[in-house]
Amino acid sequence: MSIGILAYGAHVPRLRLQRRAAAEANAWFNPGLKAQGKGERSMAGWDEDPITMAVEAARDCLADLPREAIQAVHLASTTLPFADRSNSAVVATALNLPQAIRTLDLSGSRRAATSGLIAAVQAVAGGAGQTLLAAADKRKAKAGSPQEMHYGDGAAALLIGEGQPIARLIVAHTETVDFVDQFRAFDRAFDYGWEERWIREEGYLKIVPPAVKAALGKAGVAADGVSHFCMPGTLPRIAALVAQKCGLPEAAVRDNLAGVCGDTGAAHAIVMLVHALERAKAGERIVVAGFGQGCDVLVLEVTEAIATLPPRRGVTGSLARRREETSYAKFLAFNDLIPLDRGMRAELDKATAMTALYRNNEMVHGLVGGRCTECGTLQFPKSKICVGPNCHKFHTQVDHPFAEMVGNVMSYTADMLTYSPEPPQHFGMVQFRDGGRMMMDFTDVDVGKVEVGMPMRMVFRIKDQDQQRGFTRYFWKAAPAGAAQS
C-alpha cells in the first residue's frame, strides 16, 4: 500500500466567451485589446460559482468510487462565495458525505490548491484517511481589462489516499516569498495587478527556478527525466522560460489552456495536473509549480494503476462540451458588471428561513428523497406516507439519494414571463428511470432544443440570490445528460 492520488476529475463550464466579442466591444477605448482577441475563455453560467463547480469536479473524480471512506474535504479558492460560512461543508453535503467528516476552506493565494494538495498528502500519511481536494475559482475582472481576456472559470478535484495510487508524490518543496504581483483587498471586487515585465523578471524567473531545482534535488530526479511540467501563468511563454532556466525539456512544458479555457486562478495548477494525468503513462514524472507569494513545487511519478482508472470527463471532456458565447453583454450581466434592469418580477424578497434550511438540509443540498421499505416506491420529497398507489403505508420511508439518478423529461415549458437571469426559464417534470418524478428547473439547455423524453442528469447549481442579505441559495437542477457527460 502506498499514498498518492487515487482519482481525478474536473469541470469547465460549457459556455465559452469568444474573446473577439470582448475586444470589439472595448476597442473604442483600448484598441490594443484586439491583439488579445483570439481564442475563447470559459464562462460560468449565472447559476455557477466555485461551490457548484467544485461539486461537479468532485462528482467526476469520485464517479463510482465508494464515498464512505472519505474522511476530509478541502476546498481551495480565492473567490469563495461565503466569508463566514464553511463553503467546503456545502460541498460535502451536496456530495452526500457522512456528517463525521472534516472540512477545510483554503484561500488567500493562487497557490492555495497546491498547498492544499501537499497538506492533504501529509495528512493522509499521518493517518487522517482519504481526503478529497477540490479547487475552483470564478474571478471577476473589470470590463475591458487584460484580466477579462486572460481569466477563465473552472474546477478540478483529486482524491488522496492509501491504496493503489495512479500517481504518488515523490517530494514537495515550498518557498514563501511575499512577492505581490497582484492582490485583492476584502472590500474590493477586482484584482489589482502590477507591471508584467517586473512580474516576469523578479517574480517567476527568480522565484520558481530555484524552487523547482530544490524539489528535483530532494527527489533525486534529473531535470531531463521530467515528462510533464505544469505551471499556470498568463504572461507569454513564461512556463517555457522557467523550464529553460531549470533545464527541463522543452517538450515537457504543458499547454496552459489559455486559448481554450483561460486561467482558472487557484484551480489552474490542479486543472493542468488533471489534464496531464489524462495522457500520462506509467513511470513518467510530473512537476507541478503553483505560483503566488512564493512557489509550491510537487514532483509526482505516475504508476501502473493509471491504466486501470475508468475514464472520467476530466478536463478534455469538459472542454469538448462547449457552446460558443458571442454576447459580451450577457457576460457582463452574468458577472454583475453592469446594473441591468431585471424588471419588477426580479424584485421579490428572497429571504431564506435558516431554520427550514437546517431541518431540510439533506433534502435541499443532498437531494435526498425517500424509498418505501414495503413496496420500493421512490419519491421526492420523503414523507410520512408512501405515495405508491397500492401501498400508502405510514412511516416506511428511508433515505434515498436522487443526485446520481438519471431521468427523462416528461413535460416542460419555456417561460418568458417568469423572471430568469437567462430567459426563457426552462422547467418541467422529470421522470426518473428507477422511479420517482420531480418538478425541476432546467439548466444548460438551448432554446428550442428541449424535447419530451430527453435524458437528464442532476447538477448542483445556484437556485437564486438574496441580494438584500448577500445569501446564495443552492438546489439541484436537471441538465441534458448527453451534453453533461460527453
Image (spheres, helix red, strand yellow):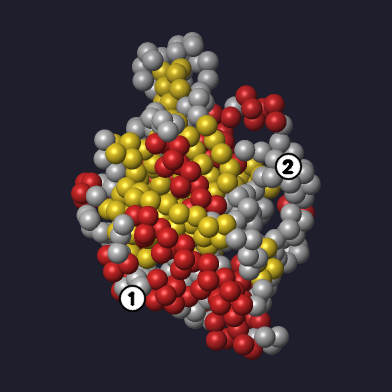
For the image, the number of numbered tags is 2
Residue 75 in view here: yes
Q: Residue at x 65, y 65 (%)?
A: 180
Q: Indicate the amino acid at tag 2.
A: Lys
Secondary-structure class at tag 2: loop
Residue in front for this viewpoint, 90 or 161: 161
Q: Quarter of the image holding residue 352?
A: top right
Q: Earlier in the sequence, mark 2 or mark 1?
A: 1
Residue in front for this viewpoint, 118 or 79: 118
Residue 288 in view here: no
Position of 287 with respect to 183 (left or right) is left
The span from disc 2 to disc 1 (Cα, nearest Å) is 54 Å
Q: Residue at x 70, y 61 (%)?
A: 184
Q: Residue at x 34, y 44 (%)?
A: 4
Q: Which residue is mark 1?
A: 250
Q: Which residue is mark 2?
A: 350
Q: Quarter of the image holding residue 59?
A: top left
